[in-house]
Amino acid sequence: MRKVLTSIVVATAALSTLSMYRSPSMDLLDEHDYAQMENDFAHAPAMSAPLDGSPYWAAYNQWLCFPTQNIEISYVEAEYGEMRKLPTLHVTQDSHFFEFSMDPEPAPNFDNIAAKWKALLKDEAAFCVYAAPLQELDVTHYSTPAESASLWIVNRLKTSKGYWNFESDENWLKENDESDAGTGE
């Protein structure tokens, strides 16, 4: 009887220990996040090929979650009539390098967005990003041990503190509204 009782206690302790190891990112997404993704899938892609006769392609936003220990906030420079600093997140996970970048139109304010991302990610164990895949990248252009790489266009970030949303970044929208006011648009 004592051996049976000891076995039950050991098994229960082992199971509770296993359940204590749980990825922090598993609890970040809720039913609202999944419903938004389903709604986006049902209505239209986040990005698609231009209607200029080139081969059609479509990319949909999806949630990806990562530990914050593997993240770097950076930027890439892109030429769009002028040089623009596009905020990016670099994450390496399971031998894959992810570059999550902003859409260059309208021109994002790197300093404001990077500050918001840093505040949202500070002291967090995990984060999730809602982004659409754009293309595979040549991993040799990056200083990473990863075997493959891809570029994604970020739409949202989520941590236990809350969200950052591309569409509702107040400073970014305010700056664009002010610049549009002078053009009569």
Image (cartoon, rainbow, N blue to C red):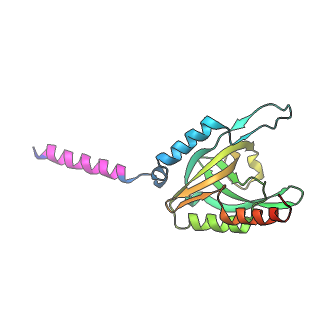
For the C terminus, the image quarter is bottom right
Using residue 123 as the reference point, say whether residue 97 is left or right of it: right
Query: Residue 59, position in %: x, y?
Result: 69, 39
Quadrant in the rendering for residue 60: top right
| 180 or 7: nearer the viewer | 180
Task: Tell me the residue at 70%/45% (across/down).
Answer: 150
Quadrant in the rendering for residue 176: bottom right
- Name of the residue lying farthest toward the right: 81
For the N terminus, the image quarter is top left
Query: Residue 171, position in %: x, y?
Result: 69, 66
| 107 or 140: nearer the viewer | 107
- Name of the residue lying farthest toward the left: 1
Query: Residue 163, position in %: x, y?
Result: 56, 58
Task: Tell me the residue at 56%/44% (across/down).
Answer: 36
Using residue 96 as the reference point, say whether residue 177 is left or right of it: right
Q: Main secondary structure of the magenta part?
A: helix
Using residue 8 as the reference point, say whether residue 183 is left or right of it: right
Q: Is residue 61 above or below residue 185?
A: above
Q: Is residue 174 above or below residue 104?
A: below
- Asked if residue 41 lies in the magenta stretch, the reply is no
Region in magenta: 3-19
Q: How many marks?
A: 0
Task: Tell me the residue at 46%/55% (across/down).
Answer: 24
- Asked if residue 7 lies in the magenta stretch, the reply is yes
Query: Residue 134, position in %: x, y?
Result: 72, 43
